Image (tube, rainbow, N blue to C red):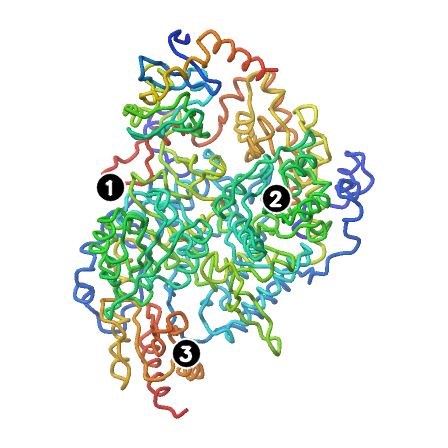
C-alpha cells in the first residue's frame, strides 16, 4: 500500500473534531425571516445588560457541516435500532416509530401549558386515557403523571408516604431498602428526609421475612421493594411482606422498574402494594435517547390520593377535563407544568398499539430471558437458582479463576457486536452479569447472543488475555477514566490545541 | 511492600504512626490496592476533630468511594496538601508520602489496642483467603 | 403483533428447549391467586393508522389556528427541521446512557459540546449534561448551595417563576430548608433593601431569576455582592435562555440554573424540556447530574467518558449529590444541534428580533388608553402591562378573535390583578402583533 494513504488524514467515521473546531467566522447554518418591525438598537434597549460581543467560541458552521458532524457522531453509537442491549433492569425494547410521529404532530407538539383549558382538551384527554390505562395495568386507584423520571417518581412516592404518615400524626424516621436495590432508592430516601436502613436479602435473593418482622417498627415509614427483584426473581411472599408492614402502619412502595415482567400477568395493586412508580422509558417503550427524557408516573391506593402532586386531572360536567390545583393536602409540585407530555404521548401510543395484547409482550420477554438462562447455565455461574422472570443474573465466579471478571467479559462482548449487559449490579452478587433481552429480540438475535457469550466463556479459559484487553474492534480502545477523574476536562476552550490524535 | 513495624493498624485498613502525642494517619497498601487508581481525596481542614471509629475522610477511585475511619480521637493539625494535585501518591507511596492527616491525639494510649504490623499482615492474609474461597 | 419478532413456531421451539409445555409454566413463581385470569381492559390493539388517527383527532381538540402571546417560562421559537433530522437518527434516539464509552462516543461528544455551549452562554466554568428542567435545576442548585455552606435558609425572589418556587418549596419541606420570599420594587427588579435586611449568616442561597417572571432584568452584580457579604451563594435561574444571545451572561452567579427549552424544543404542553446547572470549576464535585469529560485512549486518541461518577446515585447511593439517573439527554442533543445551527450570528440575530418585536408590541399597547407598562426595568421579550379591566374578561374576548391572550398575573400574584404578562418572540408576525393590539383595544372598549 502506498505510504501516501497512511499519511493523509482519515475522513468520515474515524476522526471528527468538535463542532467548535470546525468554526470559521462568518459561516452560518441558519437564516431567519427578515425583521418585519422597526429594528431596535439592542445596546440602547438593554443598556448595561447588553452582551458586548457575540458569544465567545460559539459555533460558526454551515448547515451541511452540522448535518455531517452529528451524522458522523451518531455512527459511533450502538443503539437498539442496530441490535440487542441485554442490559438488566433497563428494558431496552424497540422504540416504535409511530410514537415519534404522533408526538410531533402539529396540535400536539405545539401546545403551551398555560393556554386555556378549553383549548387543551385534546392534551387533557391524552393524559386521562394514559392514566386509565396505567391504572388498569397496575391495579391501583389513582395516579400522577408529573414526575420526569423513575428517580423523581420514587421521590414523589416517598413524599406521598411522608404526607400520609404526617397526617396520622407521625412522619416516622426510616425507610427499609433491600441491599439488592437500585442506587436511586437510597439516594431518594435521603432526599425525602428519611434515614435508610438496609435489609439483607436471604439466600434466595428475596426479602428475609424473619428479618423484616424484626426491622419493621413504628419508626419505619415504608419498605421500598423492587418486584421482580433486581435478580429477576418474583418476590413470592409479597402479600406477607405487605401484611407485616401494614400491621405496623407502614406502607409498601414498589419500584416498578421491572414491570416488563408483570404487565398483563399480575397487578401490583392486588399484591398489597400501596404506591409504586413506573418507568415509561423502560416498560412503555419511550426512547432512551442516550440518557432521557423519561417519565416516572406514580400510582397509588386510595389512601394516598389526597396527597398527589398538583395539578390533578379531574372530569367536570359534560366530560370536560380540567387541571385542578386546589388540593389542600397535596405534597405540592415536583416539577413545573404537567409532566414530560411528549414522553406521555409516546407511552400512550405504545399501549394503544398493544391493547390487551400487552400480555404477549410480557410473555415473550420472560421467554427470551429464560431461553438465554437455559443456554448459558453451566458456562456461567448462576448464584440464585430460583426461576427467572424477564431478566437473569449470573456471576463471573467461573471466569474469575482465570483472572477474567465481569467488566472484561462485557468489554469482549462489544467485539461480538453487542452492547454489554449490566455489570456489577446488583451489589449482592459479586461480579454480576445482569441480562434482560426484552421481548423485542428474535430467537435469532437471542441465539447470536448465546453463541457470543459461550465463545467468551471459552476464551476466558483458553485465552484470558484476549478478554482482559478487550474491546479490540472499537473506534476508541479503553479510555483513561482515571485521568478523566483526576483532572476533569469538562468543556472545550478556544485556547485548546486542536486534537491531532493518531488514527 | 512491607508494613512498617512502628505503625499500628485498624481492621478498616488505616495505619497510624505515633510520636508522643502527635500522630500521622494513612491507609495501607492493601487498601490502596483494593481501591485501584485514586482520583480524589476529601480531607478535613486543620482544626477539625476526629472521633475514633467515625469517618473523617473519603478516598475515591473512578468507580468507588471509600470512607476512612479515624483510628483514634484527636484534632487535625495538618492535612496532606500534596494529595490535592497528586492523589495517586496514595497508590505509589501509601505508607509514606500518601499520608492523609497529622493529628494531635486526645488519648495517645488508645493506639495500643490496635494491631501491630505482624497482626495486621496475618489479618490481611485471612482476608485474601476468604476472597478466593 | 408487529413489534414482536417471533413466529408461533419459534415460540414453541423455545418453550421446548426449556422443557416447558406452555408459557404459563414460566410464570409459576407468581402465586396462582395473583395471576390474572382475564385480559386487561385496555383500548386497542390499534394498527399504526389507528394510532395516528387517535392523536390526529386529539390534535384538533387543542389550539390550532390561534395566535398566542404566552411566555411565562415556555417560549415559542423557530426550530430548524435539521434538528429533528438528527434527533430521529436511531443511533441517537434509541441508544442508552453512555456508560460504555467505547460504543457511545457519539452521545458523549455531543454531551461535551452541550456542556461547552452552556458554559459559553452563561459565562460559567462547568456545566452538567442536563437536569429534568429549569424548575428542578433551580431546586438542585439550592440543594447544592446547602451542601456547600451547611446553612438552611433560602431567600428566593418573589419574581422567580411561581412554579419554580412551588417545586423549591416541595423539596425544601423535606430537607428542613426554610424558604423565604424577597419582594420586588416598582421597577420590577428585586428589592435590594429587603434582601439586605433578610440576609444573615444562616442563608445558603439567594435565588433570583433574570429576566425574571415579569420579564424584568435583574442587576446581578449588586445582588452577588450582598449575598457574598453574608457568605451566601447567588443562584440565578434563567427561564428564557435565548436572552443570553444578546444579554450579559450571569458571571456573578455562583450557580446558574437554566431552562433550555428555547433551544430547539417544542412547547409540547409542558415537557420534555432540558435543565442545566452551570457553576465554577471549584464546585464541580458538589454538582448533581452527569458530566462528560475529555480523555484519551491507549493509543492517544481523544475520546469522552462520563466522569466524576462518584457523586452520583449508582455509586454514592444515600450520600449522592442527587438521586438523578435518567436525565434529558436527547433534549440536550436537540439544544446542541439547534445552537450549532444558530451559531454566533444566528443567536444574536434571533435575540435581537425578539428585542425589536417586543418593543414594537409595547409601543402599540401603550397607545391604548388605560394600558400602561407595569414595571420600568429593561426587558428582553416579555413585559407586564396593567389593564383597566380584568385580564380574564379581556382574554375571553380575545379568544373570540382566535387570540390566546397574555398570562394572567393575578392568578399567582394577588397583588397584581389586572396585570398581564405579554411575550413576543421572533415567531410573532407584525400582523399578529397589530391584530392583538387592535383586539385588545376593542376588548377594553366593549361593553360588559
Residue C411 lies, with reference to residue C444, above or below; the image says above
Both marks 3 and 2 on one chain: no
Residue at mark 1: A494
Q: Who comes first in sequence, dot 2 or dot 1?
A: 2
Q: Which one is closest to the eye, mark 1 or mark 3? A: 3
Label 1 element class: loop
How far apart are labels 3 and 2 at the CA level?
Answer: 51 Å
CB under 8 Å between discs 2 and 1? no
Is residue C195 visible in this depiction of the protein? yes
The image shows a total of numbered marks equal to 3
Residue at mark 2: A223
How far apart are labels 2 and 1 at the CA level?
Answer: 51 Å
Query: Mark 3 belongs to which subunit?
Result: C
Residue at mark 3: C403
Q: Residue furthest bottom?
A: C447
- Residue drawn 60% across the image and 72% down it: A315
| Residue C142 image offset from top left, x and y in percent | 37, 50
- Residue drawn 35% across the image and 14% down it: B17
Label 2 element class: strand
Label 3 crowd bin: few (<14), some (14–19), many (20+), radius 10 Å: many
Amino acid at each position: 500500500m502506498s505510504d501516501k494513504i497512511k499519511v493523509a488524514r482519515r475522513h468520515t467515521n474515524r476522526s471528527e473534531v468538535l463542532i467548535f473546531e470546525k468554526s470559521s467566522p462568518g459561516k452560518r447554518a441558519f437564516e431567519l425571516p427578515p425583521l418585519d418591525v422597526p429594528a431596535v438598537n439592542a445596546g440602547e434597549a438593554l443598556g448595561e445588560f447588553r452582551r458586548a460581543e457575540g458569544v465567545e467560541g460559539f459555533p460558526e458552521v454551515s448547515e451541511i457541516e452540522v448535518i455531517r458532524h452529528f451524522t458522523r457522531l451518531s455512527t459511533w453509537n450502538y443503539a437498539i435500532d442496530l441490535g440487542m442491549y441485554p442490559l438488566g433492569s433497563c428494558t431496552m425494547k424497540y422504540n416504535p416509530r409511530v410514537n415519534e410521529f404522533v408526538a410531533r404532530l402539529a396540535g400536539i407538539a405545539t401546545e403551551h401549558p398555560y393556554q386555556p383549558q378549553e383549548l387543551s382538551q385534546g392534551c387533557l384527554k391524552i393524559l386521562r386515557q394514559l392514566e386509565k390505562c396505567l391504572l388498569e395495568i397496575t391495579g391501583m386507584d389513582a395516579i400522577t403523571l408529573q414526575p420526569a423520571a423513575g428517580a423523581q417518581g420514587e421521590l414523589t412516592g416517598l413524599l406521598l408516604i411522608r404526607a400520609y404518615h404526617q397526617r396520622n400524626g407521625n412522619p416516622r424516621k426510616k425507610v427499609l431498602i433491600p441491599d439488592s436495590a437500585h442506587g436511586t432508592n437510597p439516594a431518594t430516601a435521603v432526599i425525602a428526609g428519611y434515614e435508610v436502613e438496609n435489609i439483607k436479602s436471604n439466600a434466595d435473593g428475596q426479602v428475609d421475612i424473619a428479618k423484616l418482622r424484626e426491622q419493621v417498627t413504628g419508626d419505619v415509614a415504608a419498605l421500598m421493594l423492587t418486584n421482580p427483584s433486581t435478580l429477576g426473581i418474583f418476590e413470592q411472599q409479597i402479600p406477607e411482606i405487605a401484611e407485616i408492614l401494614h400491621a405496623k402502619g407502614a406502607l409498601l412502595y414498589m419500584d416498578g422498574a421491572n414491570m416488563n415482567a408483570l404487565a398483563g400477568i399480575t397487578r401490583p395493586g392486588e399484591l398489597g402494594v400501596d404506591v409504586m412508580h413506573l418507568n415509561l422509558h423502560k416498560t412503555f417503550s419511550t426512547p432512551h435517547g442516550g440518557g432521557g427524557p423519561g417519565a416516572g408516573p406514580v400510582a397509588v391506593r386510595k389512601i394516598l390520593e389526597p396527597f398527589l402532586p398538583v395539578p390533578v386531572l379531574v372530569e367536570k360536567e359534560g366530560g370536560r377535563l380540567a387541571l385542578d390545583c386546589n388540593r389542600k393536602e397535596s405534597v405540592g409540585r415536583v416539577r413545573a407544568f404537567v409532566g414530560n407530555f411528549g414522553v406521555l404521548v409516546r407511552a400512550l401510543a405504545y399501549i394503544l398499539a398493544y391493547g390487551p395484547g400487552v400480555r404477549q409482550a410480557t410473555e415473550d420477554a420472560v421467554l427470551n430471558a429464560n431461553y438465554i438462562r437455559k443456554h448459558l447455565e453451566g458456562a456461567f455461574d448462576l448464584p440464585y437458582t430460583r426461576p427467572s422472570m424477564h431478566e437473569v443474573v449470573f456471576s463471573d465466579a467461573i471466569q474469575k479463576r482465570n483472572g477474567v471478571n465481569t467488566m472484561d467479559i462485557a468489554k469482549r462482548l462489544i467485539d461480538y457486536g453487542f452492547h454489554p449487559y449490566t455489570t456489577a449490579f446488583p451489589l449482592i452478587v459479586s461480579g454480576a452479569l445482569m441480562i434482560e433481552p426484552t421481548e423485542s429480540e428474535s430467537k435469532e438475535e437471542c441465539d447470536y447472543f448465546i453463541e457470543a457469550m459461550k465463545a467468551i466463556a471459552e476464551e476466558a479459559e483458553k485465552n484470558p488475555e484476549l478478554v482482559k484487553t478487550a474491546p479490540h474492534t472499537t473506534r476508541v480502545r479503553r479510555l483513561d477514566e482515571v485521568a478523566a477523574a483526576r483532572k476533569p476536562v469538562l468543556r472545550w476552550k478556544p485556547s485548546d490545541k486542536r486534537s491531532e490524535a493518531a488514527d | 511492600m512491607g508494613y512498617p513495624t512502628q505503625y499500628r493498624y485498624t481492621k478498616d485498613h488505616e495505619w497510624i504512626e505515633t510520636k508522643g502525642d502527635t500522630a500521622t494517619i494513612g491507609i495501607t497498601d492493601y487498601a490502596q490496592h483494593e481501591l485501584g487508581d485514586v482520583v480524589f481525596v476529601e480531607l478535613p481542614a486543620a482544626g477539625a476533630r476526629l472521633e475514633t471509629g467515625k469517618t473523617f475522610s473519603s478516598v475515591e477511585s473512578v468507580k468507588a468511594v471509600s470512607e476512612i475511619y479515624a483510628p483514634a480521637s484527636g484534632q487535625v493539625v495538618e492535612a496532606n496538601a500534596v494529595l490535592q494535585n497528586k492523589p495517586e501518591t496514595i497508590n505509589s507511596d501509601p505508607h509514606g508520602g500518601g499520608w492523609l492527616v497529622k493529628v494531635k491525639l486526645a488519648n495517645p494510649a488508645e493506639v495500643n489496642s490496635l494491631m501491630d504490623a505482624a497482626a495486621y499482615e496475618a489479618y490481611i492474609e485471612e482476608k485474601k483467603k476468604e476472597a478466593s474461597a | 403483533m408487529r413489534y414482536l419478532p417471533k413466529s408461533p413456531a419459534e415460540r414453541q421451539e423455545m418453550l421446548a428447549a426449556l422443557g416447558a409445555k406452555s408459557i404459563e409454566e414460566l410464570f409459576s413463581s407468581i402465586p396462582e391467586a395473583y395471576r390474572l385470569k382475564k385480559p386487561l381492559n385496555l383500548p386497542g390493539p390499534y394498527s399504526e393508522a389507528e394510532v395516528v388517527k387517535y392523536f390526529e383527532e386529539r390534535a384538533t381538540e387543542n389550539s390550532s389556528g390561534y395566535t398566542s402571546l404566552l411566555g411565562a417560562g415556555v417560549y415559542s421559537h423557530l426550530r430548524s427541521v435539521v434538528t429533528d433530522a438528527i434527533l430521529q437518527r436511531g443511533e441517537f434516539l434509541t441508544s442508552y446512557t453512555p456508560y460504555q464509552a467505547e460504543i457511545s462516543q457519539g452521545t458523549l461528544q455531543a454531551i461535551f459540546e452541550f456542556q461547552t455551549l452552556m458554559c459559553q452562554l452563561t459565562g460559567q466554568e462547568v456545566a452538567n449534561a442536563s437536569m429534568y428542567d429549569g424548575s428542578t435545576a433551580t431546586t438542585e442548585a439550592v440543594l447544592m448551595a446547602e451542601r456547600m455552606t451547611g446553612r438552611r435558609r433560602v431567600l428566593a425572589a418573589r419574581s422567580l417563576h411561581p412554579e419554580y418556587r412551588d417545586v423549591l418549596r416541595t423539596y425544601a419541606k423535606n430537607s428542613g430548608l426554610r424558604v423565604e420570599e424577597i419582594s420586588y420594587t416598582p421597577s420590577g427588579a428585586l428589592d435590594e433593601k429587603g434582601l439586605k435586611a433578610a440576609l444573615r449568616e444562616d442563608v445558603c442561597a439567594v435565588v433570583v431569576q433574570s429576566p425574571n417572571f415579569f420579564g424584568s432584568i435583574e442587576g446581578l452584580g449588586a445582588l452577588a455582592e450582598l449575598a457574598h457579604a453574608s457568605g451566601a451563594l447567588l443562584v440565578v435561574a434563567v427561564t428564557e435562555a435565548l436572552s443570553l444571545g444578546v444579554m450579559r451572561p450571569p458571571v456573578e452567579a455562583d450557580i446558574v440554573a437554566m431552562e433550555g427549552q428555547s433551544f430547539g424544543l417544542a412547547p409540547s404542553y409542558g415537557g420534555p424540556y432540558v435543565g442545566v446547572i452551570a457553576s465554577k470549576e471549584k464546585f464541580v464535585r458538589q454538582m448533581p447530574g452527569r458530566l462528560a469529560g475529555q480523555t484519551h485512549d491507549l493509543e492517544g486518541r481523544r475520546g469522552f467518558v462520563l466522569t466524576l461518577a462518584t457523586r452520583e446515585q449508582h455509586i454514592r447511593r444515600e450520600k449522592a449529590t442527587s438521586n438523578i439517573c435518567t436525565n434529558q439527554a436527547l433534549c440536550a442533543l436537540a439544544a446542541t444541534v439547534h445552537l450549532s445551527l444558530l451559531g454566533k450570528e444566528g443567536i444574536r440575530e434571533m435575540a435581537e428580533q425578539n428585542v425589536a418585536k417586543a418593543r414594537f408590541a409595547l409601543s402599540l399597547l401603550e397607545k391604548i388608553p388605560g394600558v400602561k407598562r407595569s414595571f420600568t426595568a429593561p426587558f428582553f421579550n416579555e413585559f407586564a402591562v396593567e389593564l383597566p379591566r380584568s385580564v380574564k374578561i379581556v382574554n375571553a374576548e380575545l379568544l373570540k378573535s382566535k387570540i390566546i391572550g397574555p398570562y394572567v398575573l393575578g392568578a399567582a400574584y394577588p397583588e397584581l390583578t389586572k396585570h398581564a404578562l405579554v411575550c413576543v418572540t421572533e415567531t410573532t408576525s407584525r400582523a399578529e402583533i397589530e391584530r392583538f393590539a387592535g383586539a385588545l383595544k376593542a376588548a377594553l372598549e366593549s361593553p360588559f
